[in-house]
Amino acid sequence: MNTMHHHITKLKPNCLVYMQHLQNIKRSIFAFLLCIPTSLLALILFLLLFYNGFTVFYFHLPFPSNPQPEPANFSQGNLAKNSFKKLPASVMYAVKEDTPPVILKTLLPLLQNPAITMIPINHSVVFKPNKTHGYEAVKRMLRSSDNLKRFSTRVREFFGNHGCKVRFFMTWISSLKSFGDREFFAVESLFRSHPDACLVIVSNSMDSESGSLVLKPFLDKRFKLIAIKPDFDYLFKDTHAEKWFKGLKKGNVSPGEVSLGQNMSNLLRLALLYKFGGIYMDTDVIVLKRFTKLRNVIGAQTIDLETRNWSRLNNAVLIFDKKHPLLFKFIEEFALTFDGNKWGHNGPYLVSRVVSRVNGRPEFNFTILPPPAFYPVDWSRIRSFFRGPRDKVHSTWLHKKLEQIKSESFAVHLWNKQSREIKVESGSIINYIMLDCCVFCNSSSSSL
C-alpha cells in the first residue's frame, strides 16, 4: 500500500508538467490562428467543410457515351437529268430541272412528283392555332387605315397619270430609319438604267411625311416614284392568300419564328405582280442594264456543276405579266404550305418547288435565267466583291470579273444579310459598279 502511494505521489508532478505543456501548445495554436487574416481563415474553413461534404455525399453516375451525329443525306439520286435549253439572245439561256435535289434533315422540304399538279391542303399548317405568339404585334402590323384612299386607286392613278410603260415594285416592311444608303442606291441604279420607269414602294413607313423627305431627291429630278401603304385585303382577294390572310388576322395561323415582315414581303411581291404585272426587285439589288427585253422571267441562284441544271431559284428579282399562271401557283403554294419557322421556305425554296412541278407544261410560259443574270456572286462569296485589289494577280481577277458582269448580268444581288456590315473598298467590283450606276454620284456613299 505504501509502495503504491509512493508511485502515485511520484507521478503527480509529472502529470502536472504534461498538462502544463498541453496548455502551452493550446495557447500557441490559438495565438497562431489569431494571427491569420480572417479571409484566409474563412477560406481554410470553407475548404475543410467542402472536403467533408464531398466525402459524405459523393457517388458516381455512369454516363452513356455520346452518340455519333447522323450525317445528312446529300444523295443526288432525285436530281433531274435535263440539260440547257437554248433561248433567244435577249434572254440568254434557260436551265430546267424536274426536281431539285432532296436534302434530308434540312429546311428544304421533300418535293412531290412533278407530274402531280394538285397540292393537298395541309390544314395543320394553314390553321395552326397560336394566338399567343406575338398576336397583338401581328394585328398592329396588318392594320390598315380606312381614312386613306384605297391602295388600288392610288396605284392605278399613279400609273395612269405618268403613262408608265415600265413598272417596278419594291416592298419595305421595316422602319423608315433602317432605309439606308444601300436601299437608296438600289433606287438610284434603277433610275439610272430606266429613267422612264415608274416605281411603287409598298410600305407603311415610307408612305409618310418623313418618307417623302427620303424620296424627295428623286422627285426633284422628276423621276416617277411613290410610296403607298399596302391594302392586303385587296391584294390577296380572289387568290388562295385571301383565306390564309384571314386566318392570320384571327390568330388561327401561326406567324412562326421567322420575321413576319420577311414572309409578308415574300407574299406581297407575288400579289403585286399578279394584280398589276411588272418587275419586282429587292432593295439590295443593283440594276446594271435595262430589263425591258425580259418578260416572264425568274432567275436561278445556283446550278449543279455536273449536270448544268439549276439547283435553286430565287425571288429577289421577278418579271411577270399581270395574272400570269405561275404567279397564281406561287401564291397557292404560299397559302397551302406556309411555315413561319423555316427560313426561305416561303421564298426561294417556294419558287423552286413550284417551278420543279410545272416546268415544261404548255400552259406555263416563262424563262429561267442562269445565275449570272441576277446573282453573279453567291452569298458565301459576296465579300470578295467589296474588296479592293490586294496584288497584281488579284487586280487582274477583279477586272476580268467586272467585265464578265457587265457583259452577262442585268443586276447584282448584294445578299444584304451577309454583306450589310461590309465596307466598299476602293478599286473593288462594287466600287466600280457604283460609279457606273449612280444618279447622285457626288454624294453616293461608299458604305453600302
Image (tube, helix red, strand yellow):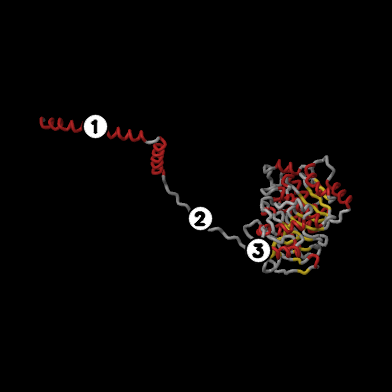
Comparing labels 2 and 3, the label whose residue is closer to the camera: 3
Q: Are marks 3 and 1 in contact (CB under 8 Å)?
A: no
Is residue 176 shown left or right of residue 36?
right
List x then y, in percent, for residue 71. Answer: 58, 60
Identify which residue, 307 or 161, lies in the foreground: 161
Is residue 383 shown left or right of residue 30?
right
Identify which residue, 86 or 245, lies in the foreground: 86
Quadrant of the frame with the N terminus: top left
Mark 1, residue position: 20
Which residue appears at 67% of the width and 69% of the height? 306
Comparing labels 3 and 1, the label whose residue is closer to the camera: 3
List x then y, in percent, for residue 74. Answer: 62, 63
Which structural element holds mark 2? Answer: loop
Mark 2, residue position: 66
Residue 394 bears which disc, if any? 3
Q: Label 1: how many residues lie within 10 Å, few (<14), some (14-19) or many (20+)? A: few
Which structural element holds mark 1? Answer: helix
Q: Are marks 2 and 3 in contact (CB under 8 Å)?
A: no
